[in-house]
Amino acid sequence: MRRAHTVDQVRAAEAALMAKLPEGTLMQRAATGLAVAISNFIGFTYGARVVLLIGSGDNGGDALYAGTHLARRGAEVTAVLLSDKYHREGLAALLKAGGRVADGGGASADGQPAAARAIAVADVVVDGIVGIGGRPGLKPEALAAVKLAEEHQVPIIAVDIPSGVDVDTGETPAEHVKAALTVTFGTHKICHLIDPAAAACGPVHLVEIGLDLPPAPVESLQDPDIRALYPTPTGESDKYSRGVLGLMAGSTQYPGAAVIATSGALAGPIGMLRYVGPDPVAEAVRAQHPEVVAGEGRVQAWAIGSGLGDELDVDKIRELLDAEEPVLLDADGLKALDDSGDRANVLITPHAGELARLLGVERHEVEAERLKHARQAAERFDVTVLLKGSTTVIAAPDGQIRVNTNAGAWLATAGAGDVLAGLTGAFLAGGLTPIDAAAVGAYLHAAAANLASRGGPITAMQVSAHVAEATRQVLLEE
């Protein structure tokens, strides 16, 4: 499991550890890991041209000491000082190792400012502008240096976080670094996992430095966590004990939604699926999936909403919301949600536009502040929220946050949400809590899409067809 901590949690853990260690030890640990990551990223060290963008604070110190390690191994390291509050000892170490300083005022042989020339010909630029305590946005001189690297297509490695993003929310309200790699220390930060900031991080490499951290407010499940949660049947299991899901999806207007959602549900752990809907749609479902039972009966959970269109029965759905069985609400089913009653067993799966309508805000606000709005909806409606997107944010009403980050861009295709609704509903019927069902469903849904895609376009039915193989790969991996 990947865990992401807040700025305050990280600072407190760093302070506690630094009190036990000789001065400078923690920074040297971080710098050593950063230097190795830079070398691995470039693919060589001797002769590499490395530019360090140095602001105030410890991130600049980490970058300077990492540059010192690289200079000692033959790299050509140039520090561009963007603040007069740079780390003095770190710069002295870099200069002693053969590094140099360039600033906008000095000119190189071709008449360009020395800093601009160094950035233009660099193999990599290291973002040590601001640390985790920095505010969103970049000062003009720093922004100019970053834009110059982008103009010359020089990759940027961010130290701890891409400078300019909001660390604790994942928001990017102002100009910021867009990194090809982020090297972080001790733990992930929330901005590494939640878009839009996560998209600015690139791959995130974690360097362990020995922090003793409290429980994390944001978690991201990995294969071992999925194996531990998956409701695998035993020799004593039967189709009823494995879980029976009731599916209320599709309509004469959108019959395909029922077929697609059914495909997702049957790819999950359940032993039986009951489809409830118009007879012509039920016939289409059974033609594709003859094992499905049409008609109402005893179920362990409901998945409701995909493609209901004009046939939405709000009163019926609200009756089911007030019953004891867990309910997943998707798409049109979300129109039946209100903020009355106990909804602890309810999981909703909106995209940004649907969540915006529920909260009475604009879609762009949800997209810019995904964590904030997922939390708001979970608290207001007392439900677990699975906010779909390039990174899936899952917020429970008790404050727990899970994030799924393994989805590829090709998953943005019509019907993919129907597959997710059916699959995740199957985990509810299999006995998982709403937050666990959401996390496991989103993870395997994305894994299946990656298998189906392999870098190319896919359809929703192809995603559902690959869920079983994705599940086998996770469950059998040791």
Image (spheres, rainbow, N blue to C red):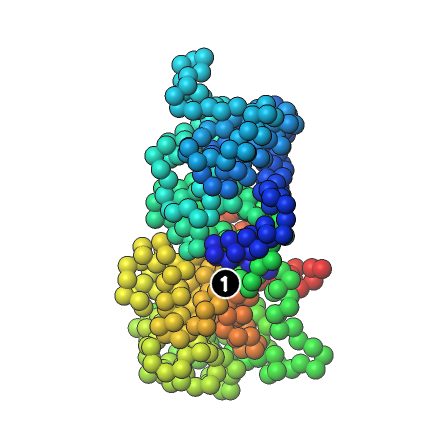
Q: Position of residue 68 (x, y in %)?
A: 59, 31
Q: Is residue 116 above or below residue 286?
A: above
Q: Is residue 46 above or below residue 258?
A: above
Q: Is residue 215 left or right of residue 256?
A: right
Query: Residue 399 versus residue 335: which sits nearer the camera?
Result: 399
Q: Position of residue 430 (x, y in %)?
A: 57, 76
Identify residue for label 1: 217
The quadrant of the image that shows the C terminus is: bottom right
What residue sits 56% from the left and 25% below the top? 95
Instruction: Inspect the image, locate mark 1, and give the three-letter code of the amino acid beneath it.
Output: Pro
Q: Is residue 363 above or below residue 149?
A: below
The quadrant of the image that shows the N terminus is: bottom right
What residue sits 47% from the left and 56% below the top? 8
Q: Is residue 131 left or right of residue 440?
A: left
Let me know if residue 401 appears in the view.
yes
Q: Position of residue 404 (x, y in %)?
A: 51, 59
Farthest residue, direction top:
109
What residue sits 70% from the left and 82% below the top? 236
- Secondary structure beneath dot 1 equals loop
What residue sits 46% from the left and 26% below the top? 119
